[in-house]
Amino acid sequence: LKLEALRKYQILGEGNFGQVWLVTESESSSTPYALKIQAKFELIEGGQADTVLREKEIMSQVRHPFISNLVKTHQDTDFLYMLLDYAQGGELFNAIHADDHDGLPEENCQFYACVIAEALAYMHRRFIAFRDLKPENVVIDKSGYPVLIDFGYAKYIPEKSFTLCGTPNYLSPEMITSRGHSCSVDHWALGVITYEALTGLNPFFEEGMDQTTLYKSIVQDHYPYPDEASAIAADFIEKLLIKDPNQRLGSLAGGEDDLFAHEWLERFDLERLRKRELVAPWVPECRDALDTSNFADWSD
């Protein structure tokens, strides 16, 4: 990766350990990429050095149309660099929680759930759990297809892991109680983000709730019925948000196939979906290849 040749345009995102920039590989190239820059000192201080190494290792192994493609990596004395494909539609979070609405039409939610489930199924066949599925870690590409990003918590789990990790609002009961978890934590999170996409609300978190109360709610409580959803959509969510991971949709005898056989997703032709032959319900409007209008403004 020739850093000196890259042209930076705008910050796409910012986190505890660095930034993501929209770049092209040279002044003359119009092919956009997302450049993730992380400070080594901050990573080491934050105990995240192993996390970023595992992210690079896993992203180097996976190749799927709905998983962000790691193009190149580089490091110098102070920083780590990951060059990734640029998804122009912005974060799924911004699509769900827009200025003029909270929640999306059910048709959109169905499509996003099916595409994300297909990406997860690919990973789970390789015993890789994503472990941080949330709307901020899903971006929409220029065709309107969701793509998974940020593999910092992804892990090869042939049997069980006991590490508490991820984002509190999307954690599964078995991760919170440290009973040991497997890939089914991703199915729980799929249920949470599907509920959020349909209603604009998190099924377990309420404004002002502290983390202990949130965890208690996830482990013990039943969520409010999603009135905005059809009965079939509500059933899909209910089968994913089952407290016992062994009884959860995707972890039964039929495995991941059960997700796609469910009445809410069964209409999708998976072969055509993987080839991006199905028209997405929302395709981002972009002026050109470098348009960033679907991302939050980080210029301040």
Image: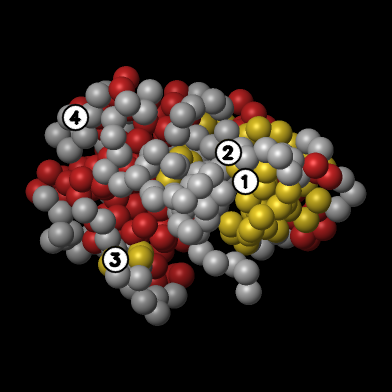
Decide: is 215 above or below 117: below
As shown in the figure, which amino acid type bears the numbered disc 1? Ala
Residue beneath disc 3: 102
Among numbered discs 1 and 4, the one appearing first in the sequence: 1
- In the image, residue 93 lies at what x, y percent? 41, 58
Among numbered discs 1 and 2, the one appearing first in the sequence: 1
Whether residue 171 can be seen here: no
Out of 134 and 267, give the one closest to the viewer: 267
Residue beneath disc 4: 266
Residue beneath disc 2: 85
- Outermost residue to the right: 77
As shown in the figure, which amino acid type bears the numbered disc 4? Glu
Decide: is 182 above or below 99: above
In three-dimensional space, the C-alpha distance between marks 1 and 2, rounded to whole angstroms, equals: 6 Å
Give the residue displayed 62% in from the left and 40% down from the top: 30
> Label 3 neighbourhood size at 10 Å, few (<14), some (14-19), many (20+)?
some
* Front of the two marks 2 and 4: 2
As shown in the figure, which amino acid type bears the numbered disc 3? Asp
**Do the residues bearing badges 1 and 2 touch, measured as CB atoms within 8 Å?**
yes
Dot 2 falls on a residue whose secondary structure is strand
Dot 1 falls on a residue whose secondary structure is strand
